[in-house]
Amino acid sequence: MVDRRDFLMLTIGSALLSDATAAPFARRTRFKAVAFDAFPIFDPTPVAVLAESLFPGKGSALMNTWRVRQFDYQWLRVLSRHYADFLQATEESLLFAVKQLQLELTADKRQQLMSAWSNLTVWPDVPEAIKTLRMAGLRLAFVSNMTAAVLAAGLERAGIRDEFDAVLSTDLIRSYKPDPRTYQLAIDHLRLQREEILFVPFAGWDAAGAKWFGYSTFWLNRLASPPEELGLTADATGQDMNALVQFVMQKDAGP
């Protein structure tokens, strides 16, 4: 026969293991919300796989050139006050990349590569982790350079759209991270204090931007990239959503 003390211990142990009883964790974290960049949630690697299939032996070079110019164009357009949204900047940077590498980009290949950005799927560890965070009482949001339509469509495909309280694209203010105004979006829309929000970036430069802004930051470094040399580090780092969940749940709420 199980006495009352044993019963309580069994109940607490079950709560640690079961998403269905994860709500008690809400009392153990000082955060009220988690704001994600797009790519801790969405897997961009199929774009690289497609690039290699369309340009055998050249896919890696194409992705590297494309990725660098993609960010260059975003930031250059903001600085010059000639804004274009994520998809336009991405397509323009693709056109530059194929010219620099002297590749032949047919209309069909161009359409396939751009469509890949609009039809990203979530990483395998995302749905269960998102459920756990929600059951813990946390509010969830995106703060991403991608367009809101692409983000929302991806969440719908994954069946987790209703788990997110806000899908915030920096397109709302016609800018890109790490502009401080972009990080402010989560505070304004969630109506929370800065210290109540944990920011989860994919890239090292975004981790730096979030720290400069003043967010507690968990760098979800899926690609094991080296940190940027910008004089500051994320509060914690991990390579998957399980590491993020453990970090969030172990944060002491304090008195």
Image (spheres, rainbow, N blue to C red):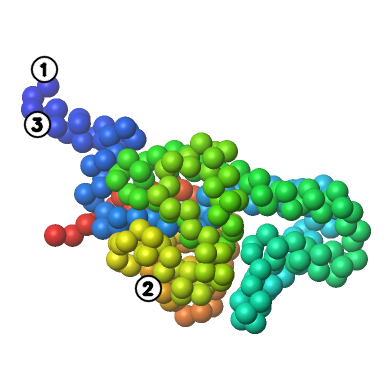
Q: Nearer the viewer, residue 46 or 190?
A: 190
Spatial CA span between label 2 and label 3: 43 Å
Res 18 seen here: yes
Q: Amino acid at mark 2?
A: Gly
Q: Residue at x 89, y 54 (%)?
A: 106
The residue beneath circle 1 is 1
Residue drawn at x 51%, y 75% is 179
- Mark number for residue 214? 2
Q: Which mark is residue 5?
A: 3
- Dot 1 falls on a residue whose secondary structure is loop
Which of the pair 238/40 is nearer the observer?
40
User: What quarter of the picture does the N terminus occupy?
Assistant: top left
x, y percentage for residue 238? 46, 56
- Amino acid type shown at disc 3: Arg
Query: In the rendering, at what x and y percent does residue 136 appear?
Result: 30, 44
Most distant residue in the top direction: 1
Is residue 255 toward the left or the right of residue 223 in the image? left
Where residue 102 sits, quadrant-wise, is bottom right
Marks 1,2: beta carbons within 8 A: no
Residue 52 makes an appearance in the image: no
- Earlier sequence position, callout 1 versus callout 2: 1
Looking at the image, is mark 1 or mark 2 nearer the viewer? 2
Residue 72, given in percent of the width and then of the height, sits at 68, 74
